[in-house]
Structure formats: C-alpha cells, structure tokens
Amino acid sequence: MRFSIRPGRPPRATTTGLVLLVMAAAVVALGIGRYGIPLTRVVGIILAPIVPPVEPVGATEANVVFTIRLPRILLALMSGASLSLAGATLQGVFRNPLIGPQVIGVSSGAAFGGTLAILLGATHVGLLGSAFACGVAAIVLVYALNDVIARRNILALVLAGVVINGFFTALVSLVQYVADSEDTLPTIVFWLMGSFATASWDKLNLVAVPMLAGCGLLLALRWRINILSLGDEEARALGIKVERLRWFVLVLVAVVVAAQVAVSGIIGWIGLVVPHMARILVGPDHRSLMPASLLIGALFLLIIDTVARTLTATEIPLGILTALIGAPVFALLLRKTERGGHDG
C-alpha cells in the first residue's frame, strides 16, 4: 500500500486551531445532556471560582458540571488522545499504516485482565490494576515470542502481536463462557463494548499519571520515531539504537493503551483511523503528526462520547459507535490517500 500525503497547512497554526477546537468542544459537551445548561452559563460555572457570576451557581448545576460531566469529558479526551497517539507511533515504528494498538495484543491483554477482575468480583481499583497488569504482560509476551522466533524482524514482531492478541481474545471468551449468565456476563459484555458511564475523579486520578507520562514521553521521542520510520539501516547509520528504542516505545504504547482499556473497556478504530486524518492534515512528519493525532483523537472521542450519552434514552456503547463511524471513514481516507498517491 502506498501513501502519498499532500502538504498540509502550517503545523503550528493547525495545532493552535485544534487546541481551540478541543477546548470549545469540551465546553459545549459540558452543557449537553438530559440536564441542559446554556453555553454562557457553562462558562460562568467554570469561571465561578475565579469570577463569581451574577446568578450564583446552584448545587445541581455544580454537581452536573463538576462531579458528573467534567471527569467524564476529561477521561474521554485523555483516552482519545492516548489511543490516537499510540496508533500514530505504531504506524511510524512499523512503517505500516494498517497497524493499530489492537494489533500488538495490548488491548486484548488488558481486556482479559478487566474481565477476569469482574468475574472475581474485584473492586474498581482491582479492575484497573488487573487490566493494566495484563496489558503490560501482553507486550512482554510479544517481546518473548519475537525473541524466540526471529529477533530483529519487524514482520515477526507484528505476527507475534497477532498471536498474543488471539491468545488473550480466547481467554476473554473463556471468562465469558464461565461467567454467570444472569449477573456477571452482562456486566462483562457491556464493559468490553466500551463506556465512560462510570467515570469519576477517582478513576481519572488513577489513570492520569500513566496516560500523561506515557503520552509525554512519546511526544518527546517523536523526532526519533521520524528516524525509525525511515528504516532500520538508516536509523542505525544515524546512531540510533534501533532495538532498544523500538521496545521502549512499545512499552510506552502498552502503558497508555492498557490504562485506557482499564478505565473504559475496548474502544477500537481510534488508533487506526485518527493518524490517517492527522497525516492528511499536517503531513507525514511525526514532529507534527503526533501532536495533531493526539488532538484530533481527543476531539473525535469526545464527540463520539457526547453522541453516545445523548442520542438515545439508553447510553450507546462506544465500541459500537466507533466501529460504525470508523469503518466507513477509514475506507474514505484510504481512497483519498490512494488517489492522492496516484495523482502525485
């Protein structure tokens, strides 16, 4: 598959525009829901601790904005940013635009940890810890399997990820098979389909550190990922220790993806589709592509979550919406990039 990317807008202006768009979308999302709040009132409530509004903030308004919606919106922004940044990183490291976080087995590993915790009746903290531990364990198994099969072979590394992904997917099915069909199984199925319905400040605090630290380190390495995307021989010629850097990047990806799955279940397509959107917007240079992917992913998942909680009386699982939207969008993006390649 050949991708030819047209020159995009100036990256700094694009990044600034995306930041403003994310902030505006977050404010709008705070006011949307069963308890509607006008946009100007939302701004007044947010600024109330600094600039007291003319009309005092009621207890219900404060509870809706600060206790219910704000942690959920922040969690959606961080999860979308983490998934899309992980996808852009993996596509650069493996030099393959069809690679996503689920391919290397991290998502299915974390999903197994989460479903096992639900089966055993663990607390929220136990679920988060189990999903996180199994997600990281998946990347360790990929490393071990790759080391046995064919070290320093990118194709073997991807195949090892596919194998581990299939292994943990089978374990998830086994957990579902033995779960109580009247009580535990529905909980597991709903969790696997992805949702921020149980978002809280406690959950946000638990995953904020691994997500922010992982994303920060990945962004700091974006120029090195640029070099990795040129090829191993070129990277070694430029003094990069390819194997060490590649595995360090994979561990960082595992950390941010496992944290996302631990808190909201599996949310597919974000890590695969969003980097293509960013590549069309700012070009293939990872110094611009990765920040743009992060911002577009945050915006994309925030919009999806807002639709999921407001479109119908019963909340729609995020995994369904991301698949329904992501699949045709991905097909259109592939058609656009392929046409651009042939035209260019």
Image (spheres, grey):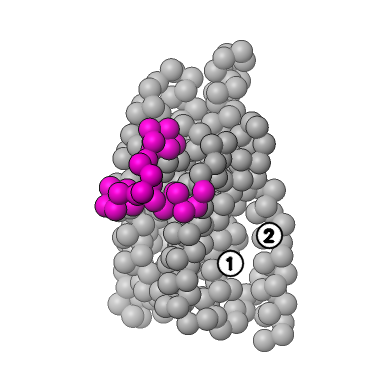
Mark 1 lies on a secondary structure that is: helix
Write down the region rendered in magenta: 38-64
- Decide if residue 139 is in sight here: no
Image quarter for residue 273? Answer: bottom right
Nearer-the-camera pick, 153 or 28:
28
Q: With 238 as the anchor, is 308 left or right in this view? A: right
- Residue shown at 48% from the left, 19% from the top: 119
Whichever of callouts 1 and 2 sits on the residue coming sooner in the sequence is 1
Image quarter for residue 330? Answer: bottom right
- Provide the residue designation for mark 2: 329
Q: With 188 as the anchor, is 136 left or right in this view? A: left
Residue 270 in the image: x percent, y percent?
A: 56, 53
- Residue shown at 54% from the left, 18% from the top: 184
Residue 332 in the image: x percent, y percent?
A: 71, 65
In the image, residue 31 above or below residue 299: above
The quarter of the image holding the N terminus is bottom right
Image quarter for residue 98? Answer: bottom right
Residue 152 in the image: x percent, y percent?
A: 43, 62
Q: With 322 as the anchor, is 76 left or right in this view? A: left
Q: Amino acid at mark 2?
A: Val
Mark identifier at residue 277: 1
> Does 62 appear in magenta?
yes
| Residue neighbourhood size for the residue with mark 2, other residues' Cα within 10 Å, grouped as few (<14), some (14–19), many (≥20) | some
Tell whether label 2 touches label 1 (CB within 8 Å): yes
Q: Amino acid at mark 1?
A: Met
- Residue shown at 64% from the left, 31% from the top: 314
Q: CA distance from mark 1 to mark 2?
A: 9 Å
| Residue neighbourhood size for the residue with mark 1, other residues' Cα within 10 Å, grouped as few (<14), some (14–19), many (≥20) | some
The quarter of the image holding the C terminus is bottom right
